[in-house]
Amino acid sequence: MGLHDPVTDWATDFDHTDDAWVADPFPIWDELRETCPVAHSERYHGVWLPTRHDHIAEIAHDTERFTSRQVIVSEYRAPLDMAPQGTAPPITSDPPYHQGARRMLLPAFSPQAVAKLEPYTRQACQDLVDQLEGNDVVDAAEGYAQHIPVQVIAHMLGLPASDGDQFRGFVNVVLEGVDQKPEDREAGIVEFFRYLKDLIEDRMRNPGDDLVSYLLEVELDGEKVDPFWVTRMIGLLMIAGIDTTWSAIGASIWHLASVPGDRERLIAQPDLLPTAIEELLRSYAPVTMARLVREDIEFNGCAMKQDDFVLLPFPAANRDPAAFDRADEVIIDREVNRHAAFGLGIHRCVGSHLARMELRVALEVWLAAFPDFSLADAGAVRWSGGQVRGPRQLPLKVETRSERY
């Protein structure tokens, strides 16, 4: 993808931006889980990769030895004095600060608040499929999945949906540009924070009924938080709330295009969709988080150094046969499914209710509009690199319900 040479040994020199990883990381995780459960690489100035569910869970729950002050692996490391807030609270916050910061967001992402967003989300999805109908081949990633969380987050922040192209550009810089030249990535991040700064300043002058205005007024420990703190939190919501969800939607549609039996079953049994969604989340969990080692430690025989990164591939945890029966199979009626798609430990995704609602509505609307679809060209599907995995190009042959009947 960028600066680094191709990987030749995944156990000692892995790179999560390598083309082979981007195309299909599952065989890599499976092999490492059997032969080298915790891999290491000197890339990015030192990074570790556990692949077993128990190791990933242990690190995710261990806030004493592993800090969350930076959760994206790159050539840069957030300085120690960024803790306990970190670069993008609350996901980068350590205890005890984390609990209060997370509590600020909970009302906006409660089941009740999410339910109020469902009609808007459904209409947005319907408008998108209306624009696609009439075409024999459509791109379900570029023309559908990528727009849904962009529009929902923009609606929550009181921003025009027309800013969506900018949002997608910011996502690419922050999450997919980690292996680019630092000076090139820095320019994009500066532009991102300039956008956020202008947004915060506007809401301070003109408060409204939106999430930005709410965060500027809510109190933490009896005091309003600093506007720059709100800037970083909004940055987190824009990046994490968009890329993760559009990736889950796109991966789910990719699966249903690739496995017609599952697609046909959901058409015939729509009540199965909530259960199927949990299995799709397990099987194609989009997010790999990271931690920094607080100080030199030994972890399961690995000599980890202070400020080494540790990747937490929740998708690999979800495919561990020690944790899930028939872990490498997608079983859309799987009944017991305590997956880690939304993370493990104190940083479990605060937006999980919103993500599930968007995924459910997106699939309901898509299946109603296009009950028959398949991959137009499997070789043309392109997946994202970095720590969030989902299809970025997904050309499908489609047949509308009216054409089918």
Image (cartoon, rainbow, N blue to C red):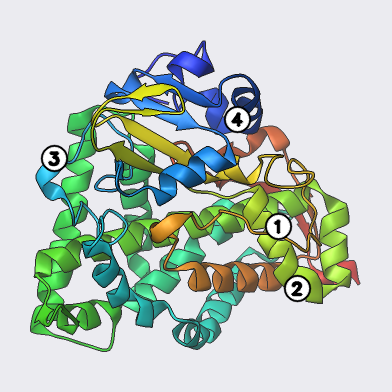
Q: Residue at x 24, y 76 (%)?
A: 212
From the top left corner, tell me how far across and down residue 182 is, in percent. Answer: 21, 30
* Spatial CA span between label 2 and label 1: 21 Å
Q: Answer left or right for 401 relative to 181.
A: right
Residue 325 visible, this orientation: yes
Establish if 219 lies above or below 57: below
Looking at the picture, tell me which residue is in the foreground, 40 or 159: 40
Residue identifier under label 1:
279
Residue identifier under label 3:
79
* Spatial CA span between label 4 and label 3: 31 Å
* SS type, badge 4: helix
* Spatial CA span between label 2 and label 3: 50 Å
Residue 139 visible, this orientation: no
Q: Residue at x 58, y 42 (%)?
A: 53
* SS type, badge 2: helix
Residue that lies at the very extreme toward the right in this rendered image: 405
From the top left corner, tell me how far across and down residue 211 is, in percent. Answer: 29, 79
Establish if 91 lies above or below 291: below
Q: Answer left or right for 97 relative to 247.
A: left
Establish if 257 lies above or below 36: below
Q: Amino acid at mark 2?
A: Ala
* SS type, badge 3: loop
Residue identifier under label 4:
29
The numbered mark, 4 or 2, whose residue comes first in the sequence reads: 4
Q: Answer left or right for 186 relative to 392.
A: left
* SS type, badge 1: helix
Where, quadrant-wise, is the C terminus in this rendering? Answer: bottom right
**Number of the front mark, 2 or 1:** 1
